[in-house]
Amino acid sequence: MTNRKPIIAGNWKMNNTKENAEKLLKELIPLVADATAEVVVCVPYTAIETAVKLTKGTNIAVGSQNVSWADSGAFTGEISADMLLELGAKYAIIGHSERRTMFGETDETVNKRTKQAIAKGLIAIVCIGETLAERQGGITESVLKTQILGGLKDIPASDFDKIVIAYEPVWAIGTGLVATDEQAEAAVAYTRRELAALIGKKANEVCIQYGGSMNASNVDGLMAQPNIDGGLIGGASLKAVDFARVVKFSA
Ligand code: 13P
């Protein structure tokens, strides 16, 4: 960790009805009230309004798990940035590996969604990461490079104030297999070098998160790494006590 403000975001994925969201957030709010990190919960669309109302006046921001590249129109099943902003969302996850593998998300669509999100005033959490086969094949860096160059294409350096990168090795997501501190730091440091090639010194200001089985027992070591500025947390964000411990990491 450095002087970049850490951002710890929960990605609830397709979990929690409004009723459960309310319970979880009511428990979470007091537990993280004194956190120094920026705290974000990326909740299902149906829980955004509830989450925004409940967290009003607290230090928790609310995000979505996707956003359309279009303003409006014939895009069945999509949601627009204006719709999210109207509900009070501040962040949007873009290009999560589950969307890439199950729903046809590509670097090109990630790029379009990211541009739209930041143009509208959302903060984009752009996800990248290699599969196990890619890591074993020794092509982690070239996979990350392709995702960075494609997903962040033609975005000026000044817009990176509104972009967070989440490095999430696919093999570590939901598997309990966390990357070692060294593996995570190496990939995140590589990501920052590639960002520097793209946007120069501004790369030093960009928050890069690690995600993939991050939890209360491994957060401190990961957050102690010089290039890791935060976390994108799946499973451990569904329990208030666990997520609060991650939020209040000590590095
Ligand atoms: P887990 O923390 O459950 O491995 O999920 C990580 C993730 O995909 C966050 O976006």
Image (spheres, rainbow, N blue to C red):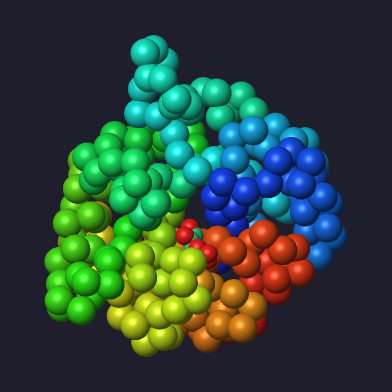
Question: Which image quarter: residue 106?
Answer: top left
> Is 155 rendered above or below residue 240?
above
Taking 179 as reference, is 148 left or right?
left
Q: Position of residue 35 (x, y in %)?
A: 72, 66
Q: Residue at x 56, y 54 (%)?
A: 11
Asked if one can make out residue 18 in the rendered structure from this viewpoint, the answer is yes
Return the x and y of residue 42 as percentages of the image width and height. 58, 48
Taking the image as drawn, is residue 2 in sight? Answer: no
Total marks shown come to 0
In which image quadrant can residue 158 be found? top left
Report the front residue among 156 and 113.
Answer: 113
Residue drawn where x is 15% and y is 76% of the image:
137
Residue drawn at the location 50% of the way across and 76% of the way down: 176
Which residue is at the front of the view, 29 or 214?
214
**Nearer the observer, 109 or 15:** 15
* Residue at position x 54%, y 50% in the image: 13
Q: Is residue 154 left or right of residue 40?
A: left
